[in-house]
Image (cartoon, rainbow, N blue to C red):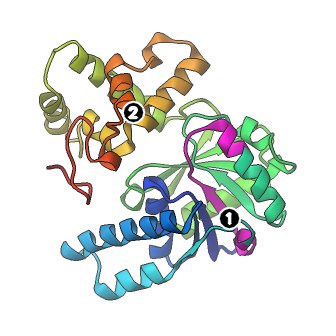
């Protein structure tokens, strides 16, 4: 199957990263957001990220222009009917995603592969909200998308072999990333492991075992992680981490998945990490620690 045009629904952190990565791979991207203002903001953030790479000599000015020229903005699902595959990256809310996929199915043709970037929700339940569940599959990307060469591919109960094989081809042959086959389970592999890692770090902080800075330094230096667990949480979005843990706690019923009290307090206070400029640490408008 040939993949030339890809739809990306949702222009948040993950949507921006996926859109940039796809465009860098030579694919045309239709980026969807609810309003023109949100679309403009998403593309501005993508350009900011490209400017950082430009400063580090990771890309050229010509490459930056080429990447941006392949990202096309739209607020219409109907325009996605020309795509070969669509990636949904909206907020981690089951009912919102169900509504989106029902609207999407009405607006596009029946041959387009539908994928969700959900990390904890049931693909089978999502697929059950549309008339053609065989064409829905999970593609769980890890942030930062452009530098992580692995994607989890999740089959729902009714995902067809044809959908799986075409999606695997897209991930491995078109994007050059390793596709990890995962059977449906809340959190899959990566989110289940990393959210427990973050939650335990939060318990350490809550118990006064060490400061946020020292907890992160211990893991970052001691185990050569790029970021410590608390900065990871800030970069994922504390609301996203909270939602993932809540989802797994609800599904598994095990106390180890129950979000720590400090995480709940931070989310209630609106300190969500990089996206708000403050979480466990402070960040500038470009997402750099200050």
| Percent x, y of residue 274 | 30, 47
Q: Which mark is residue 85?
A: 1
Q: On the image, numbered disc 2 is attached to which residue?
A: 194
Which residue is rendered at x = 54% and y = 69% of the image?
36
Q: CA distance from mark 2 to mark 1?
A: 28 Å
Report whether 287 appears left or right of 97: left
Residue found 66% across the figure and 62% down from its top: 86
The residue at 40%/51% (across/down) is 143
Report whether residue 89 is seen.
Answer: yes
Asked if residue 255 lies in the magenta stretch, the reply is no
How many C-alpha atoms fall within 10 Å of the one at disc 2: few (<14), some, or many (≥20)? some
Position of residue 245 measured from the top left corner of the image (x, y, whole percent): 47, 26
Q: Is residue 176 visible?
A: no
- Give above or below for 44 relative to 88: below
Q: Nearer the viewer, residue 100 or 122?
A: 100
Q: Viewed as shown, does residue 101 lie left or right of 187?
A: right
Who is closer to the viewer here, 209 or 37? 37
- Dividing the picture into quadrants, the one containing residue 72 is bottom right
Q: Nearer the viewer, residue 29 or 100?
A: 100
Specify start and end residues of the magenta stretch as a single range. Answer: 79-98
Q: Nearer the viewer, residue 14 or 36?
A: 36
Q: Does the segment drawn in magenta span residue 81?
A: yes
């Amino acid at each position: 199957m040939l993949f030339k045009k890809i739809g990306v629904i949702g222009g948040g952190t993950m949507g921006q990263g996926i859109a940039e990565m796809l465009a860098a791979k030579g694919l045309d991207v239709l980026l969807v957001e609810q309003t023109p203002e949100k679309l403009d903001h998403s593309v501005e953030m993508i350009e900011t990220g490209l400017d950082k790479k430009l400063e580090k000599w990771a890309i050229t000015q010509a490459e930056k222009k080429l990447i941006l020229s392949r990202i096309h903005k739209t607020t219409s699902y109907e325009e996605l009917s020309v795509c070969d595959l669509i990636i949904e990256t909206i907020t981690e809310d089951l009912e919102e995603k169900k509504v989106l996929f029902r609207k999407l199915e009405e607006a596009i043709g029946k041959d387009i592969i539908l994928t969700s970037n959900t990390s904890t929700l049931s693909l089978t339940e999502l697929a059950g909200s549309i008339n053609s569940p065989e064409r829905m599959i999970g593609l769980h990307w890890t942030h930062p998308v452009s530098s992580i060469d692995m994607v989890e591919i999740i089959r729902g109960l009714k995902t067809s072999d044809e959908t799986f094989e075409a999606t695997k081809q897209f991930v491995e042959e078109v994007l050059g990333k390793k596709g990890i086959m995962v059977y449906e389970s809340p959190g899959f592999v990566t989110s289940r492991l990393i959210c427990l890692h973050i939650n335990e770090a939060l318990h350490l902080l809550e118990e006064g075992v060490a400061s946020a800075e020292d907890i992160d330094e211990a893991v970052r230096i001691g185990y050569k992680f790029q970021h410590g667990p608390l900065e990871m949480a800030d970069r994922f979005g504390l609301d996203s981490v909270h939602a993932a843990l809540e989802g797994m706690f609800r599904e598994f019923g095990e106390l180890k998945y129950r979000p720590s009290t400090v995480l709940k307090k931070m989310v209630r206070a609106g300190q969500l990490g990089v996206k708000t400029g403050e979480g466990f640490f402070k960040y500038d408008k470009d997402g750099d620690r200050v």
